[in-house]
Image: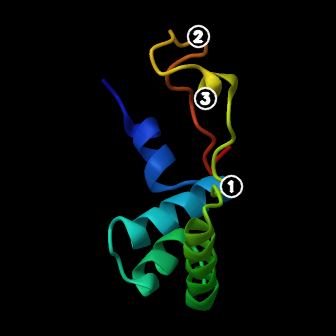
Amino acid sequence: MEDRLCLQYFLEPQQTFQRQYEALRAIVVGGEPLRLVADRFGYRVPALKSMACRFRASCRRGVTPPFFSRTAEDDLPVNAPAQTNTAPSCQRLPTADN
């Protein structure tokens, strides 16, 4: 199975929220240095440091980060069946070439 496009989606995020999420995840979960993460995701170190500080402050206040929106399924009881998604499981992702 060819997962190159799916892999590219995670390793080279194009959308702003996803790029922020992946950069913050690399810092918080991966413990990676700011400089390396900033280089990888196209941020300046001071901007990434500020983003990480705001993210941590939001977490301390109990504010949900803006990366994902709630859906109707989020309000279902834990044992309720999820609604079926009819969308393709992996669509071709936009690249810099197109």
In what element is the residue under mark 2?
A: loop
Front in this rendered view, residue 78 or 36: 78
Residue 74 is labelled as 3
Tag 2 and tag 1, C-beta contact below 8 Å:
no
Question: What amino acid does circle 1 point to?
Answer: Pro
Question: What amino acid does circle 3 point to?
Answer: Asp
Q: Specify which label sits upstream in the sequence, 3 or 2.
A: 3
Q: Specify which label sits upstream in the sequence, 2 or 1.
A: 1
In what element is the residue under mark 1?
A: loop
Tag 1 and tag 3, C-beta contact below 8 Å:
no
Question: What amino acid does circle 2 point to?
Answer: Gln
**21, above or below 47, in the image:** above
Which residue: 55% across, 74% down? 56
Q: Specify which label sits upstream in the sequence, 1 or 3.
A: 1
In what element is the residue under mark 3?
A: helix
Front in this rendered view, residue 79 or 14: 79
Residue 27 is labelled as none
Tag 3 and tag 2, C-beta contact below 8 Å:
no
Whole-percent x and y of residue 77? Answer: 54, 19
Q: Which residue is mark 2?
A: 83
Q: Which residue is mark 1?
A: 66
Which of the 4 quarters of the picture holds residue 59?
bottom right
Whole-percent x and y of residue 10? Answer: 46, 49
Give the CA distance from mark 3 to mark 2. 11 Å
What is the image's colouring?
rainbow
Give the CA distance from mark 1 to mark 3. 15 Å
Which quadrant would the C terminus be assigned to in this image? top right
Whole-percent x and y of residue 26? Answer: 41, 67
Q: Is residue 14 visible?
A: no
Horizontal arrangement in the rendering, residue 7 relative to residue 95 (left or right): left
Please give the count of numbered marks on the rendered protein.
3
